[in-house]
Image (cartoon, rainbow, N blue to C red):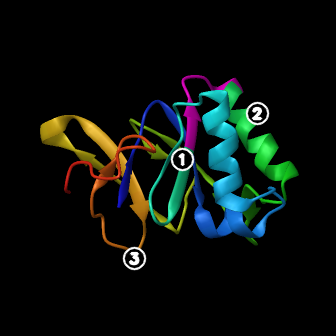
């Protein structure tokens, strides 16, 4: 499946959520966010998405996941940064740093952008946690 992107997106592989310090793994996160009424949450079989319209809120999300044990960024021997355990994606420009595990595409005829796990089929487009039967890509 693929996840519809809006404004600024924090994308995390579900396997990373399952291995970090979040109580209850993905199901715990989804339950907590549902209780908060967070409509920014989306997930497919491989990726989890949270996001915001502003960079400050994205920083708060990144800080939370860092405290849970994820490493947001890695630096190579030449000093170049890339996303590691999560990825920030701008809906207009794609990943804000290089990210080797995500694909970003623009569906021009519908004027929407989406991401999916590299090496996995696009499948259906997820626009919310409830819409797992979205647009076929």
Marked residue nearer the N-terminal end (3 or 1) = 1
Above or below for 22 versus 46: above
Residue located beneath label 2 in the image: 60
- Label 1 sits on a secondary structure element that is strand
Which residue is at a point 80% across and 56% down the rendered structure image?
22
Foreground label between 3 and 1: 1
Region rendered in magenta: 50-56
Residue 37 appears in view: yes
Callout 1 crowding tier (Cα within 10 Å): few <14, some 14–19, many ≥20? many
Q: Earlier in the sequence, mark 1 or mark 2?
A: 1
Q: Can the viewer see residue 81?
A: no
Q: Quadrant of the C terminus?
A: bottom left
Q: CA distance from mark 3 to mark 1?
A: 18 Å
Indicate yes or no whether the magenta region holds residue 125: no
Mark 3 falls on what kind of element? loop
Q: Which residue corresponds to mark 1?
A: 49
From the viewer's perspective, is 134 left or right of 10? left
> Between marks 1 and 2, how big is the CA–CA gap?
14 Å
Label pair 3/2, CB-CB below 8 angstroms: no
- State the residue at coordinates (35%, 52%): 132
| Marker disc for residue 119 | 3
């Amino acid at each position: 499946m693929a996840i519809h992107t809006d404004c600024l997106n924090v994308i995390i592989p579900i396997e990373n959520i399952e291995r970090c310090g979040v109580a209850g793994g993905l199901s715990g996160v989804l339950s907590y966010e549902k209780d908060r009424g967070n409509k920014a949450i989306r997930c497919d079989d491989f990726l989890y998405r949270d996001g915001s319209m502003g960079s400050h809120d994205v920083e708060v999300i990144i800080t939370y996941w860092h405290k849970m044990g994820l490493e947001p960024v890695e630096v190579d021997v030449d000093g170049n940064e890339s996303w590691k355990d999560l990825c920030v994606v701008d809906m207009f420009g794609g990943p804000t740093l290089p990210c080797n595990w995500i694909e970003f595409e623009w569906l021009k005829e519908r004027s929407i952008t989406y991401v999916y796990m590299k090496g996995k089929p696009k499948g259906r487009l997820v626009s919310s946690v409830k819409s797992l039967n979205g647009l076929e890509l």
